[in-house]
Amino acid sequence: MKLLEEKILKEGTVLDGNILKVASFLNQKLDVDFIGKMGSEIADIYRNDNVTKILTIETSGIAIAFAAAQKIGCPVVFAKKHRTTNINGDVYSASAFSFTHQLNYNIIVPTEFLDKNDRIVIVDDFLANGNALDGLIEIVNKSGATLVGCTCAIEKGFQHGGDKLRDKGIRIESLAIIEKMSPEGITFRCN
Ligand code: 5GP
C-alpha cells in the first residue's frame, strides 16, 4: 500500500532493537481517516472470500481490525493477553511470545466467539518473527474455523516471520513490507 509506505517514511522512527515507532498514527495516537483507508485495503484483498470474522490481539491490532471489519460487514474478536475476572467460561488459548515486551503471554479467546463455520482473517499491526500470528493461528485451528489469511499493516521482512508462514502455505498479505531499516533510512520490498 503506497500510502502506508509514504506515511511510514514521513512519520516512522527506527528505534534500537529493530523497533519501528509509528505511535503518531497507529500505536498511541490513531489517525482515524488513515486507519479507515487501511481497513478498505484489507476489505478489498478479501472481497471474494466470504469472511465471517476478523480475529486480532489486544491492543494495537484492534483499531485496524475494526476498520477492516466495518468495510467487510463482520464482527471483530480480539484475543486477550490476560485472563480477566469477567471471562469465566471455556476459552481457546495459545502461548505467544511478545516481541515488544519480551515475555510470554497465554492469549485467550472465549470459545463462544469462534466456531467451525467461521471464515477468519487475522489482522494485526506488525509482523516481525511471527509469534503473535502463530498464537492466533493456533486458536483458529483449535476452534475448527477456516483461516482465510492474515494481514498485518507492517511486516518487517528482515525478521522472516511472514516468509516462514508463507512457506507453510498460509496466505500472508501485509500492507507494507520493510526490507531494511536503520536510523538512516527504510526500504520496502517491491510487490
Ligand atoms: P511478532 O510476534 O511477529 O514477533 O511481533 C508482532 C507483535 O509485536 C505485534 O503484535 C506488535 O505489537 C509487536 N511489534 C513487533 N515489531 C514491532 C515494531 O517494530 N514496532 C511496534 N510498535 N510493535 C512491534
Image (cartoon, rainbow, N blue to C red):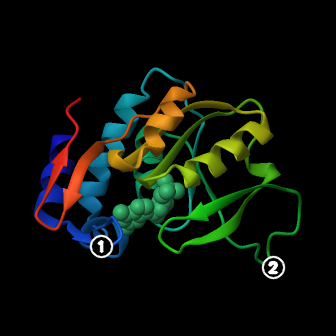
Disc marking residue 23: 1
Q: Dot 1 lies on which element?
A: helix
Is the distance from the Cβ of mark 1 to the nearest ligand 1 atom less than 8 Å? yes
Residue at far bottom of view: 85
**What x and y, as percent, mark residue 150?**
50, 39
Residue that appears at 19% across and 62% down: 182
The residue carrying pointer 1 sits among few (fewer than 14), some (14 to 19) or many (20 or more) residues within 10 Å by Cα, namely some
Query: Mark 1: which amino acid?
Result: Ala
- Residue 46 in sight from this viewpoint: yes
Answer with the quadrant where ligand 1 appears in the image. Answer: bottom left
Query: 145 left or right of 59?
Result: right
Residue 29, relative to residue 12: is it above or below?
below
Q: CA distance from mark 1 to mark 2?
A: 30 Å
Front-most of residues 61 and 44: 61
- Name the image quarter holding residue 12: bottom left
- Residue placed at 23% from the left, 68% from the top? 14
Q: Which circle, 1 or 2, is nearer the viewer? A: 1
Q: Is residue 62 visible?
A: no
Tag 2: amino acid: Thr
Query: Which residue is depicted at the point 12% across and 52% down?
Result: 6
Quarter holding the N terminus is: top left
**Residue 183 in the image: x percent, y percent?**
16, 68
Q: What residue does disc 2 label?
A: 85
Asked if the residues shown at circle 1 and circle 2 are in contact, with their CB atoms under 8 angstroms apart, the answer is no
From the viewer's perspective, tell me whether residue 134 is left or right of residue 87.
left
Q: State the quadrant of the C terminus.
A: top left
Give x and y (percent) for residue 56: 56, 53
Query: Please, what secondary structure does the residue beneath circle 2 have?
Result: loop
Does the closest atom of ligand 1 sit within 8 Å of the Cβ of label 2? no
